[in-house]
Image (spheres, rainbow, N blue to C red):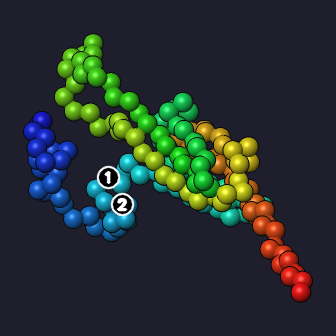
Amino acid sequence: MLLPSIFGESLLDDWMEFPKFDIPDVDRKLYGKHASHVMKTDVHEADNGYEVDIDLPGFKKDEINLSLENGYLSVSAAKSHNDDKTDKKGKLIRQERYMGSMQRSFYVGDAITEEDIKAKFEDGVLKLDIPKKEAPKVPEKKLIAIEG
């Protein structure tokens, strides 16, 4: 049965949420109602750097952008809407696939450059290898002796 979409996904979704037993809904507590739209990320520290795995299911490689600015690595992904709401089968009544954009930023340090970061996208997971790099040391201030 199709129900009108007034407040959220459907009228009954908001009014008749049944309690979930035995399985804690951790994502909803952490990220709210739209937990499915958050880039779920794992960061592993290795001796020489960090391995970052970001879940981006349903996205294609060309829908993902990486940028590095002022020491912040930004990952953004966007899926465009298909404005045509009809197809060969008829009018689209409900669409549950995610359409929109999301972004996350990570501070990686000012010493990291675009060439240092290695990125690979396969099976809906963006894998980043970010090396550990110390910022170049600022030269010490040397005092000049005053004569007299």
Judging by the rendered image, the residue that carries numbered circle 2 is 31
| Disc on res. 34 | 1
Pointer 1 with pointer 2, Cβ within 8 A: yes
Quadrant where the C terminus lies? bottom right
Inspect this view and state whether residue 47 appears: no
Q: Residue furthest front?
A: 148
- Residue 3: x and y in percent read 10, 39
Residue at the image position 68 percent from the left and 64 percent from the top: 45
- In the displayed structure, would residue 137 be above or below residue 144? above
Check the picture and name the quadrant holding the N terminus.
top left
- Mark 2, Cα crowd under 10 Å, few <14 / some 14-19 / many 20+, is few
| In the foreground, 1 or 62 | 62
Residue at the (49%, 43%) spot, across then down: 76
* For residue 41, side relative to residue 71 (left or right): left
Q: Amino acid at mark 2?
A: Tyr
| Residue 124, percent from left and from top | 53, 40
Residue 82: quarter of image: top left
Counting from the top left corner in percent of width and height, residue 25 is at 34, 64
